[in-house]
Image: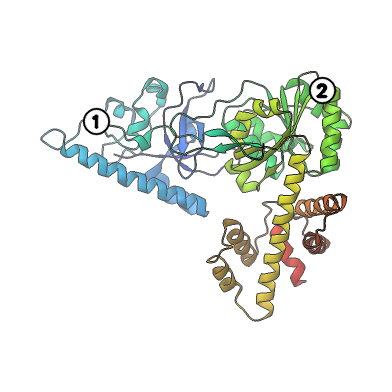
Amino acid sequence: MYHSSFRGKLGRYPPWPGKVVSPPKDLKKPRGKKCHFVKFFGTEDHAWIKVEQLKPYHAHKEEMIKINKGKRFQQAVDAVEDFLKKAKGKEQNSDGKGDSKGKKTPNKPLKILEEDDEDLSALKDPSEKPVKDDPHFHHFLLSQSEKPASSMEPISKRLKIVEEDTGSTSIQAADSTAINGSITPTDKRIGFLGLGLMGSGIVSNLLKMGHVVTVWNRTAEKCDLFIQEGARLGRTPAEVASMCDITFSCVSDPKAARDLVMGPSGVLQGIRPGKCYVEMSTVDPETITELSQVITSRGGRFLEAPVAGSQQLSNDGMLVILAAGDRTVYEDCSSCFQAMGKTSFFLGEAGNAARMMLILNMVQGSFMATIAEGLTLAQATGQSQQTFLDILCQGQMASTFVDQKCQNILQGNFKPDYYLKHIQKDLRLAISMGDMANHPTPMAAAANEVYKRAKALDQSDNDISAVYRAYIH
């Protein structure tokens, strides 16, 4: 009677519960693939998913729950169960109003499902009746109700542009129940340089939303996964820039950002009049000014767009993008920013986004060091660290960030979600920015010393929460 499907392995994504829905009329189906348009529970994400990657929900539920232990996944499963209960209630109500025998006549598309109406637990070959030709298909996969509920309509992440009092502009997520706000990918060719913690998730989401993407990475084997998912391979940064209309880069630090543009076979060699370059790395304003000047000197158009977030938020397409520079490039990147982020701000002239990003990361880095200091002081004074966390999470400082980082510390899990070496770099750059503005940054300076100590203890490639270890060694 009810059916949902688990997402198969899609790039870096685990299996995930979802439902087949009708795609927006203006969204083209990928060529050469038998696939369905799927809405994922617990998120506002959609994707074209290959038929072989879909599995029946009920038959694989227990197996998938064992594999996926995350809080977000459990919330998605809860959302499925809640949806099924509501749909069942609606169906029973409609049965009572139906024919006198209380047995509802199923919709014609029911023939696509195998087994009886007590357990519709498998999909037959969808080529038997394509989804796009059947307006009812996305309803009965979860409920055979003859009157489709509004909650079963296609739901997409919709973004709206908001002018702010400050003169900046933001593209923000609108009401998640909006029906007609699906992302239509730009027809511009997209290039992406740098497939690290952040870049990998961004590229996955660009591909998932239908963008044509050419990738390059210093260690080429990192490209293989994305090539399998439909990306094209560029041999050098220069080749990517020359092949694509908009080229994004996301690398580790100012030196890497400059080398990528001005080094051998660099982006600059592929820039032609009208080509767009978007720098997403977190660097200092001076580096942004230099890159902007060299790109525009060749007739190119420049935008900086560093991102606030983590690997998990990157994978989830929930980054916050801070953009500055050429406003027309910002507008051309609209569908890309919608695919990778929940909100995007335009902050004016080039350099402003770098300044804002460094301030944000300075605050985050200092806060993380303070939390680690509190946890270790609790231990040193005979207090329970878990109780400290429980109390903290009941107060005004409660947040997902605090809870996740502290739980990881207590579990000894320092797998990087944001590299410690990168937050130390950001603190260093923020302190330098404060020096140039003749503004004191004593808190950031103190935190920076703790992170330097953690780096000396070989924690550079661990998560920022590994700053904890600077206090216990």
Label at residue 106: 1
Looking at the picture, how far across and down is residue 77, in whole percent? 43, 49
- Give neighbour class at mark 2: few <14, some 14-19, many 20+ (Cα, 10 Å): many
The quadrant holding residue 382 is bottom right
Numbered disc total: 2
Above or below residue 315? Residue 448 is below
Image quadrant where one finds the N terminus:
top left
Image quadrant where one finds the C terminus:
bottom right
- Nearest the viewer among 290 and 318 is 290
| 197 displayed left or right of 424 | left
| 23 displayed left or right of 415 | left
Which residue is at 69% across, 79% downward?
A: 380
Which residue is at 86% across, 34% downward?
A: 290
- Give neighbour class at mark 1: few <14, some 14-19, many 20+ (Cα, 10 Å): some
Which residue is at 26% across, 28% downward?
A: 107
| 61 displayed left or right of 415 | left
Q: Nearer the viewer, mark 1 or mark 2?
A: 2
Residue on which disc 2 sits: 270
The quadrant holding residue 238 is top right
Label at residue 217: none
Looking at the picture, how far across and down is residue 127, in whole percent? 41, 22
Looking at the picture, how far across and down is residue 307, in whole percent? 68, 42
